[in-house]
Image (spheres, helix red, strand yellow):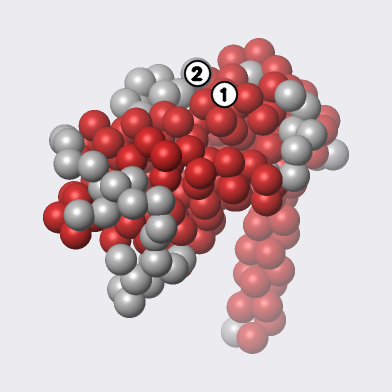
Amino acid sequence: MAAVAQLTDVKARKAALYRDAILDAAERLFALHGPDNVKVQQIAETAGLSLATLYNTCTGKEQIEQGVHERRLAELFERATGVVDPGRSAFANILAGIESYGRYFAEHPEYLRMHLHAGNDWATALGIQPGATMEAWQRGMALLVEMVRQAMADGDLVATDPVTAARLMTSAQQVMLSRWLEDGAKGSVDALVADVRAFILRAFARNMRVDK
């Protein structure tokens, strides 16, 4: 029994390594060419695997693309929610979350480029496919809207429709990240994050001073 369990564990670890290699390769190729222009054979070759091994690990390109999103979005949501501190004001948490979100994408430019190739609109979910990506968008937007609503009640944000304000914040961040990427990602991540924070403050805050 111990031998069988050990063999099963080895197979599971090998499958996980294959899956990681496939997702890494797919993310690079999707970033360069867009998912629609990448063939499964290219993913296998870039991952250094046979086509048979790829299909033994994933059912096809749709599952691979979904897998890339599931992996990155789980990391992204964990990081963004991890910076929320109940001891701070809602607006301070909004800024911390936006900074964390922007930093993650800037540190993973291939995933950011993959998003832009797909034409996804982060503010309205236009172009986002059903599945892990849509679920992550809905979860993240609901959290942001609730924090915006609280920040308005606290008097830290200009009073307006909280859903509109949350979507405008998200849209502004997407535009600024896109411009940074278009410019060759030349500026530092710290400078980019600071620019996003400053814009959110100028556009939405009733008071430029926000407690940490």
Q: Nearer the viewer, residue 157 or 35?
A: 157
Residue plotted at (59% across, 15% down): 36
In the image, taking residue 9 as reference, residue 198 lies left or right, namely left
Question: In this orientation, which residue lies closer to the viewer: 56 or 126?
Answer: 126
What amino acid type should be assigned to the residue bearing mark 1?
Answer: Leu
What label sits on residue 119 in the rendered view? 2
Which amino acid type is shown beneath numbered disc 2? Gly
Mark 2 vs 1: CB contact within 8 A: yes
Residue 150 appears in view: no
Which residue is tagged 1?
116
Q: Is residue 124 left or right of residue 6?
A: left
Query: Between marks 2 and 1, how big is the CA–CA gap?
Result: 5 Å
Query: Percent x, y for residue 5?
Result: 61, 78
CA neighbours of label 1 inside 10 A, class few (<14), some (14 to 19), many (20+):
some
Quarter of the figure that contains the N terminus = bottom right
Q: What percent of the width, then of the height, locates residue 43?
A: 73, 30
Q: Position of residue 112 (x, y in %)?
A: 61, 34
